[in-house]
Image: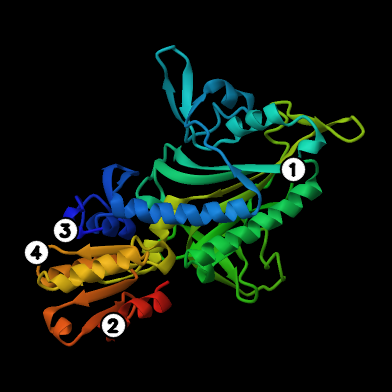
Amino acid sequence: MKRSILFTKTSKTTPKDETSFNAQTLIRAGFIDKVGAGIYTFLPLGLKVLNKISNIIREEMNAVGGQEVLMPALTPKSVWEATDRWANFDALFKLTGSDSKEYALGATHEEIVTPLAQRFCTSYKNLPFAVYQIQTKFRNEKRAKAGLIRGREFLMKDLYSFHVSQEDLDSYYEKVKEAYFKIYSRLGLGDITHITYASGGAFSKYSHEFQTVTDAGEDLIYVCKKCKVAINKEIIEEQKNCPECGCNELEEKRAVEVGNIFKLGTKFSKPFNFNYLDKDGKTQDIIMGCYGIGPSRILGTIVEVYNDQKGIIWPKDVAPFNIHLISFKQNEEAEKIYKELISAGFEVLYDDRDEASLGEKLNDADLIGCTYRLIVSQKNVDLNQVEFKERSKDNSEMIKRSDLLQFLKEYVS
């Protein structure tokens, strides 16, 4: 993409109504635009990152047998009443339609997916299976002040699994747990994301959260120095030692919850009378699990983790573009390089603006944070060289023009 046709712009001014670093920086860099508290528009750069995060999640969910669907965001009151959550889910956005019927905007989708699965599953031969979606969720947060980390409207991947037994659920639960570790590793968060014991499991003592360590986090976790498993502050009084290895050396850290998984058991299947016939023809309850992860929250978390005083430093696999190409004083060679890179399959943001100085272009490149940068100046062209720099490093290097494409294929791809 050429910068001259990108309709958004960067800003030198920090938005005064934002207190979180992720929102301030993403707005300044032209990734998002604020509509209201906890409500944001994803602009072209931001949407590219969000889609890359979502696609990584999608690939790993497909790998564990998840089948993708898209459920409605507008949900009828009746399904929430069936599970007794219409009156007891504080964060529901409720509204009345022109038909005088009441609805809720989807905060989560157990109430929709359970009767959906029920329509297609009557026998043990249909089980197990899992469905997921990546969809906008709505929650009436009282403290939407952490940018993308705590929004009133946000993107969520929610996976739901259906099983014949607790043992079958337990086995699948472990597969999803491993898939989550793969996701965080691919997103550049693997080393600082801990599986965290929390209260709230339906048929077990604990549920599990995935917490990424950052000073911007709203949660306190206690990380085992031996095995790196963590405990949420809410249950630390009843669980003084690591529940995995028994170690009593726990280190307090601040973190952001970037995922959670629950063994639901029959909590949602029973209210809908969702059962199946086993091989002996007997009626049995469906056992369920659910597995959430927030792409938009992860985007905000990555910004909180990967940055310096100049701007964002995107991990390679989620950067909006592979390469930020900068021309110093518009020249034909930069245009040739741009076309070569596009033809070779690279994603390139080409700053071809005539009116911007080199300093402005470099400052914008640091703020936007693409992983790799190329600078084409007339001086370098005369020397048959192109300047190459990684965003995360201080020093640049000169690459011979004739070697550039092969160098990038080996280094960047």
Find disc 3 in the rendering and name its residue: 13
Q: Earlier in the sequence, mark 3 or mark 1?
A: 3
> Mark 4 or mark 2, which is nearer to you?
2
Residue at far left of view:
355
Classify residue 23 as left or right of residue 160: left
Q: Earlier in the sequence, mark 1 or mark 4?
A: 1
From where the camera sits, is residue 213 visible? yes
Q: Real-space Cα distance between discs 1 and 4? A: 59 Å
Find disc 4 in the rendering and name its residue: 354
Q: Real-space Cα distance between discs 3 and 1? A: 53 Å
> Mark 2 or mark 3, which is nearer to you?
2
Find disc 2 in the rendering and name its residue: 402
- Image mark for residue 128: 1
Q: Residue at x 66, y 73 (%)?
A: 248
Disc 2 residue crowd, few under 14, some 14–19, many 20+, Cα 10 Å = few
Residue 174 versus residue 38 in the image, above or below:
below
Q: Three-letter amino acid code at disc 4?
A: Asp
